[in-house]
Amino acid sequence: MPRPALIIGSVAIDRVATPFAQSDNILGGAASYAAIASSYFTKTRMVGVVGADFPAAFRARYRKHGIDLAGLQTDPDPAGKTFYWSGKYREHFAGRDTLEIQLNVFEKFSPILPPAYRDTPFVMLGNIQPSLQNHVLDQLVKSPKPFVLADTFDLWINLARPELDRLLKRIDLFVINEEESLLLTGERNPVLAGRLIRKMGPPIVVIKKGGHGSLLFHPDGYFAISAYPVTKFVDPTGAGDSYAGAMIGYLASVNRTDFAALKKAVAYATAVSSLTVESFSVNRLSSAGRRRIDARYKELVKITRF
Amino acid sequence: MPRPALIIGSVAIDRVATPFAQSDNILGGAASYAAIASSYFTKTRMVGVVGADFPAAFRARYRKHGIDLAGLQTDPDPAGKTFYWSGKYREHFAGRDTLEIQLNVFEKFSPILPPAYRDTPFVMLGNIQPSLQNHVLDQLVKSPKPFVLADTFDLWINLARPELDRLLKRIDLFVINEEESLLLTGERNPVLAGRLIRKMGPPIVVIKKGGHGSLLFHPDGYFAISAYPVTKFVDPTGAGDSYAGAMIGYLASVNRTDFAALKKAVAYATAVSSLTVESFSVNRLSSAGRRRIDARYKELVKITRF
């Protein structure tokens, strides 16, 4: 019996430059990528904030995916503008630099869950300040305890470590990339880093290695998946968000969190994020359709089995 | 019906320093690692050259593995010394520097196959000058055509490209690491690099990504395997040689080169090389035993299946 999933995170208008192309005024933000990814698997609720300038076309994009927008706050300030981020990827996509940030309405964002969202059984805390992630947890029903996935990034590991440490003790699944796992643990071997992160709190940990696949650490065992062989790489923005969104959406759709379900969630996340990187913004992710996701999932089974 | 395998390559006495430890006067060379790895799967013949100083204990090590040493030439010069290599790995194993090379008897080495070796059906051309690799091919029987695996490294890609290009058109399987695949093709995406290398000649290509697993390109399809989760990483020297040796040994043991057999060969190679890196020299590789290799192979099946 499928359950709904709840996504909390940033909603942004992005300008992205890669070594090959650039795109401006495009839909971005962790919640956008994650909610669309999750929507392929289950009924998805979204909490975020936008300004009065937020384009109707972007809202229509969410609606196309059937995303429940009761939690998408529009800031009451009629001159309020949506969070704006401009970034540029370095040559060979070796890191990226933020060129401009306008926090705008996101600056004083405090996620408030509509009462009907508080008992959502599968929750993803997208990459926002750990204090806000903790604040969301405080609003969830205590019983039955929801299954909570959290994401983060290097800034919070460096600047908000105590709040992040507190968060790690309260969540079920932590999804992090390889560089962040090194920053968090000081351990370069991702197999050892994953074990160390589990000791910090979350019983389940996923370490993403981009084009090298990902690793799953679960109380019942270890699992490693190769990357989907992407050959038309356009823009990595949102790959991690859609990865996490696909995981929470899949888990909610099967209403399971055992090892076998987590492996499948990681495989679906691999398939979904491989689509995200094939375009700017959510374009490819949104147009792909469930059938193409399932085809990539099957392809992953095929290319990894021996 | 198992067939024998033939390994051609360097035999060396090494001094290796890692960021954590060092070891001197240890058995090294591509042929040593590859032949021991291959010996776990099938009867293995070895062609190389040593000096009069080559320790009896090292020869005994080959014999312990039942390696046929009829092709291991001892240089007639009574003062001839074995090839000596001293290298140091940089911090975090980010590359290595050669501190000293004494080519010694290896300088004028020209591999001569004993007549009984010339119809060996599975041949590995370890990392030596491409001109010598071509010279070995000239000595093999033309019919039935043997299955030939070749390895190389960055020096030959930079310095002996025409001979390497000629070699690539004559072999069946080329095994290369990710950095070398970039150097050879100019393509950073290993999925595209693998396809480009196949166009240079070898119908089957393997790109090794170290701790990130490896990719197989075969006329019948693409296959990707995650790395074995090594947690006691000591010294990567010989990992690639034992990987290739395990591949040729396994393929000879099943006398098959179809896609299914190649996938299994890659998985065995992954298991074997994960043992090699757990010690200096061939120590762990040699002491592991077939049972431990099979256990790691089974573990690889388990941690990659979903």
Image (tube, coloured by chain):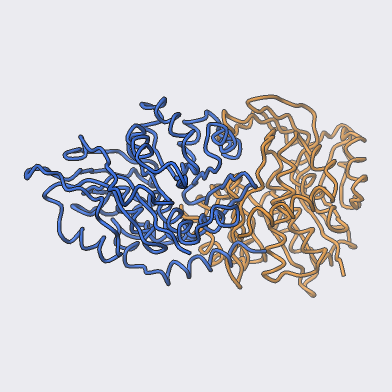
Chain colours: A blue, B orange
Q: Nearer the viewer, residue A126 or B230?
A: A126
Image height of A158 relative to A136, above or below: above
Looking at the image, residue A209 sits to the left or right of residue B7; the answer is left
Give the image location of residue B48, x and y in percent. 81, 47
Q: Is residue A140 visible?
A: yes
Q: Is residue A237 visible?
A: no
Q: Quadrant of the C terminus of chain A?
A: bottom right
Looking at the image, residue B166 sits to the left or right of residue A68; the answer is right
At horizontal 30% and vertical 38% (from top left) the residue drawn is A97
Give the image location of residue A91, x and y in percent. 35, 45
* Most distant residue in the left direction: A78
How many numbered marks appear?
0
At horizontal 72% and vertical 52% (from top left) the residue drawn is B299
* Most distant residue in the bottom direction: B143
Image height of A230 relative to A10, above or below: below
Looking at the image, residue A271 sits to the left or right of residue B154; the answer is left
Looking at the image, residue A305 sits to the left or right of residue A250; the answer is right
Give the image location of residue B194, x and y in percent. 54, 60
Q: Nearer the viewer, residue B156 or A16?
A: A16
Q: Nearer the viewer, residue B175 or B258?
A: B258
Q: Nearer the viewer, residue A267 or A75?
A: A75
At horizontal 81% and vertical 47% (from top left) the residue drawn is B292
Give the image location of residue A98, x and y in percent. 27, 38
- Locate residue B238: give its quadrant: top right
- Locate residue A230: give its quadrant: bottom left
